Amino acid sequence: MRMDEDRDKEVVKRRKELSVDEDVEELREIFSVLRSEVPGLLKGLIEPLKEIMDLTYNPERARERAKAIASFYKELVDQGIPEDLALKLTKEHFINPMSVLKSVMKGEED
């Protein structure tokens, strides 16, 4: 009877070791994927954020953006679009860079 118990304990111990080995291998695979994928993901996030920050805090870019927004609105009104609709379309067409940053930081989708 004692031999059966020892054998059972050994089987359980071996299964645990195999399970740990499988877990370690799975973690290695996960980290390998992370090492290869995360840098590209970060670059994909950082570049647009840099552009948004530049757009928001660079005075020349802010002037250019303001002119583009005003021109868009004026063109809509000049073409006979009612002012309230032109304003709504302008707001929808030109995204506020800070609202985009806030959404990204909160993890919200547009």
Image (cartoon, rainbow, N blue to C red):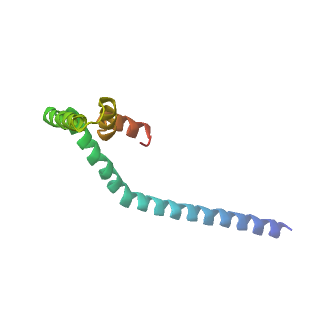
The quarter of the rendered structure image containing the N terminus is bottom right
Q: Residue at x 57, y 65 (%)?
A: 22
Residue 101 seen from this side:
no
Residue 83 image-quadrant placement: top left
Residue 61 position within the rendered picture, expressed as x and y whole percent measured from the top left: 16, 37
Residue 8 position within the rendered picture, expressed as x and y whole percent measured from the top left: 77, 67
Observer-nearest residue: 56 or 74?
74
Residue 85 seen from this side:
yes
Q: Residue at x 15, y 37 (%)?
A: 64
Observer-nearest residue: 49 or 85?
85
Residue 76 position within the rendered picture, expressed as x and y whole percent measured from the top left: 25, 38
Judged left or right of residue 62, residue 43 is right
Residue 35 image-quadrant placement: bottom left
Query: Can you name the residue that lies furthest to the top here?
Result: 84
- 86 in relation to 5, above or below: above
Observer-nearest residue: 6 or 39?
39
Query: Can you name the residue that lies furthest to the left here?
Result: 60
The quarter of the rendered structure image containing the C terminus is top left
Judged left or right of residue 54, residue 17 is right
Judged left or right of residue 82, residue 2 is right
Q: Residue at x 37, y 54 (%)?
A: 38
Report the number of discs.
Answer: 0
